[in-house]
Image: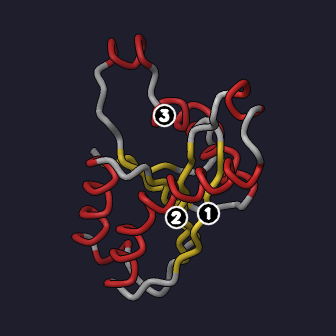
Amino acid sequence: MKILVPVDGSAYTKRMLAYLAAHDEWLGETHRYTVLHIVPAVPPRAAAVLDKATLKAYYEDEAEKVLKPIRAFMSRHNLSVEYVVKVGHAADVITSVAGKSKHDLLIMGSHGHSALGNLVMGSVATKVLANCATPVLLVR
């Protein structure tokens, strides 16, 4: 099974990884994993005054802060993982990557907002569920 695992480095990502570790059926050589981290884009006006190398270094540094502990977790479980870093809006990028690379399952943590919280703030998980054709396993 080809599994997409979006991560943001939050406590909800850690909870999702703990769920994976506790359920052996999700960790194994029969699965192929893609860990996806989305770095929010620098506002266009700010990006316009930065040279491309500085901007690229910023995105790489921000991604590495999140991916370093994820790499350690995956390594501890002897999993072969592809790491993908994209820049943009999380829900849009997750939906796009899941569809284009034809993943069988998407496993992600959820902040567990109430219905009112989703209405006011929106939710990446809610938007992914609404727009993604790939089956989604949400871990709260």
Residues under numbered marks 2 and 1 in contact, where contact means CB atoms less than 8 Å apart: yes
Q: Which residue is mark 1?
A: 84
The amino acid sitting under disc 3 is Val
Nearer-N-terminus badge (3/2): 2
Crowding near the residue tagged with mark 2, few <14, some 14–19, many ≥20 C-alpha atoms within 10 Å = some
Question: Can you identify the residue that label 2 sits on?
Answer: 35
Q: In front here: 80 or 31?
A: 80
Q: Earlier in the sequence, mark 2 or mark 1?
A: 2
Give left or right: position of 37 versus 10. Answer: right
Horizontal side, residue 135 vs residue 24: left or right: right
Q: Give residue 75's quadrant in the image.
A: bottom left
Question: How far from the left and from the top, in percent, is residue 132?
Answer: 62, 41
Residue at numbered disc 3: 124
Local SS, label 2: strand
Kind of residue sitting beneath label 1: Val
Density class for disc 1 (Cα within 10 Å; few <14, some 14-19, many ≥20) is some
Color theme of the render: secondary structure
